[in-house]
Image (cartoon, rainbow, N blue to C red):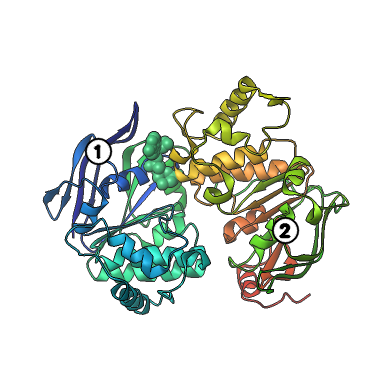
Amino acid sequence: MKLELRGITKRFGNFTANDSIDLTVEAGEIHSLLGENGAGKSTLMNVLYGLYQPEEGQILLDGVEQHFSGPGDAMAAGIGMVHQHFMLIPVFTVAENLMLGHEPTRGLGALDLPAARRRVVEISERFGFRIDPDDRIEDLSVGQQQRVEIIKALAQNASVLVLDEPTAVLTPQETDELMGIMDELRKEGRSIVFISHKLREVRQVSDKISVIRRGKVVGQADPTASNEELASLMVGRAVGLSVQKEPAKVGEPVFKVEHLTVFSKQGHRLVDDLSFEIREGEVLVVAGVQGNGQTELTEAILGLAENTSGSITLSGKNLLTESVRRTLDAGLGFVPEDRTEDGIVGEFTIAENMILDRFHKRPFSSRLALNMRRIREYAEQAVEDYDVRTPSIDTPVGRLSGGNQQKVVLARELGRELKMFVASQPTRGLDVGSIEFVHKQIIAARDSGIPVLIVSTELDEVVQLGDRIMVMYGGKSMGIVPPETGREELGTMMAGVPHEQ
Ligand SMILES: Nc1ncnc2c1ncn2[C@@H]1O[C@H](COP(=O)(O)OP(=O)(O)OP(=O)(O)O)[C@@H](O)[C@H]1O
Ligand SMILES: [Mg+2]
């Protein structure tokens, strides 16, 4: 089905998120939207999906004008959407979530549970998803949850499919599989709008690329354009796509993990007898396919793991036996893997989120009263430094674009006196300009002489940030190697083959 958006304008108060946007997607076309964090991509898609009413403009499907008063109308007209932030209900099963997806729709008729289960199996088999209809969402990995979202959209026979940053949380292999699926859907004549910050995959999969900057379409590009061309079209300036850094000036190995084992509730070893050190002034990147114990390792450092043996020490202090509060107070900067779950409180303002874990500390608090002036000054500065695109520091963080939410977490965690910095997927969902900035900040933290531990599944990031790279597989280290190690060797280690000394 051919999709046309004509002159779409969407405002929030005085802020124009979409400014007279035109976009045409032909049947059987994969059309990518590129743009900075906060450029207005998700907003445009939410307009298309009937979640927002535009102030101006038209939506046409095969030349016929549409009026969507809600997602139900959009779904009934054949539009499916996989949101940037998942909309699944964690305590329900896959099939139950599918049923819910149909409830508000008109014309399709509600699915009963057996029908929903059949539909899941059918789509899952057809695309090789390996998703069981009776799995509970909360037991699935993010990659699997992503598939459930896609199944939901396909179950309605969507002929226009919107994928808003579907690959942000996927492993490279899952991403390849998704690209294959998109290709199949294109062959069936469906139109796909694809949003991603990863230039390489945008170039790989797109038929056409539209670039949005500050709410306006600023240009079109072919998939043959170079990364540099796309990046500068997006950001409006040349972007350094590789990290500039001096060789590490390392000090003492103040951070030590010794024979760490983290057990799951069922007694499985999620981290299995792991030992390594990080020196002052050094970045150790933990690489590997998601789900090989990296998350549990960082949680153990913070003090969240319940069932552990071995030790984790920072300057001789055992972090495993410290409370989370005391570890943070003692100077651990910590960026969690899932910002919406652990990093921010969506209903709180930017200013409030900036001081989330230290509101009880000076200079923000003098005994009882929070010092609002200091908090506000601090938040204003952080918003400026990190280029958080927001109407003001009083905006609830939940209203910010995904990438800007991530910047708030990073600004908070990097912007204080640190003894160590730990971050999982620090640049997930960030645009190329912001990635450049965050990488500089991480290197600055390292150059201030603290140990830095970064968990990343992005190979580019792994080799650019790491002074040393530890690959995890099945909770164990497959070896620690220098960043000059070839991609092939890293890939082999990620697949579970220990590095030969
Ligand atoms: N409900 C809302 N109320 C107020 N402002 C909003 C709302 N939704 C979005 N905005 C603002 O509109 C702008 C565009 O946001 P949008 O989510 O569309 O960006 P995006 O291009 O998808 O960015 P990202 O790449 O980070 O996901 C942002 O500045 C955001 O703060
Ligand atoms: Mg978005």
- Amino acid type at circle 1 is Pro
Q: Which residue is mark 1?
A: 54
Q: Could you classify mark 1 by the number of other residues whose Cα lies within 10 Å: few (under 14), some (14-19), or many (20 or more)? A: many
Asked if one can make out residue 233 in the rendered structure from this viewpoint, the answer is no
Q: Decide: is 125 above or below 303.
A: below
Disc on the earlier residue, 2 or 1: 1
Secondary structure category for the residue under label 1? loop
Disc 2, SS: helix
Q: Position of residue 360 (x, y in %)?
A: 70, 32
Residue 440 visible here: yes
Q: Which residue is mark 2?
A: 300
Is residue 228 left or right of 121 when viewed as pictured?
right
Query: For the view shown, which residue lies furthest in the left direction?
Result: 64
Q: CA distance from mark 2 to mark 1?
A: 46 Å
Q: Quadrant of residue 364?
A: top right
Name the residue at 57% across, 36% down. 353
Tell whether 245 sits left or right of 45.
Answer: right
Instruction: Tell whether 328 sits left or right of 45.
Output: right
